[in-house]
Amino acid sequence: MRVFSNSVGDIQGFTGYSSSLNAIVLSFRGSSNLQNWIINLSTNMVAYSRCTSCKVHNGFNTGFNLVKSVVNSQIQALRALYRNVPIYITGHSLGGALGVLAAPDVKESFGNLAGLYTFGQPRVGNSEFAKYLDTVVGGIRVVHNGDLVPHIPPSALAFVHSST
């Protein structure tokens, strides 16, 4: 298992091999400090390069881009040891949003994305992004009815969850 972090946004997570799953796991940590909340509050939408008309949360997109290269290099190193095993992505809260943005990138770069599982994930993008995610990746989004985080950013700002 290898931990990754970025000092600018304090984005953290790990990559590792699970012998019980015979799979690579990419996991993102949820919000834990002021740097993470600054990312969470940067709610303006920006264009998402993988899909025409898709827009995503600026803070989440910036957060993923801060760790994208190290995540890709860690997965590449694991793929060299464990060829053709599936990859699972997971995260909680902010980590769920980062996992959503990582999933299409990981699928395109490495293939064999077996699953995306998020817990208490906020909304990440507009309706076009949600449709794109459903088509390209899918996934399971687990929420607790009383948790505020899955209800932000508000749908009044055009943020929408994927269908799962």
Image (cartoon, helix red, strand yellow):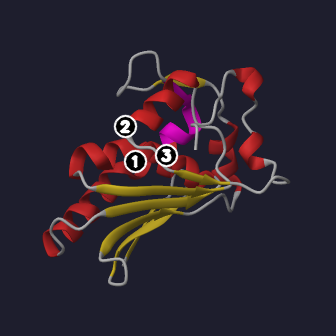
Magenta region's main secondary structure?
helix
Q: Residue at x 39, y 17 (%)?
A: 52
Image quadrant in which the N terminus is located: bottom left
- List x then y, in percent, for residue 3: 42, 72
Q: Are marks 2 and 1 in contact (CB under 8 Å)?
A: yes
Disc 1: which residue: 103
Residue 136, numbered label: 2
In the rendered structure, which segment of residues is drawn in magenta? 55-62
Left or right of 133? Residue 10 is right
Could you tell me residue 141's position as x and y percent?
60, 51
Which label's residue is closer to the chain start, 3 or 2? 3
Q: Residues within 10 Å of mark 3 (few under 14, many from 20)?
A: many
- The picture quadrant where one finds residue 132 is top left
Of labels 2 and 1, the one closer to you: 2
Based on the displayed image, in which of its 4 quarters is residue 95 positioned? bottom right
Mark 1 in CB contact with mark 3 (< 8 angstroms):
yes
Q: Name, please, the residue furthest toward the bottom.
A: 19
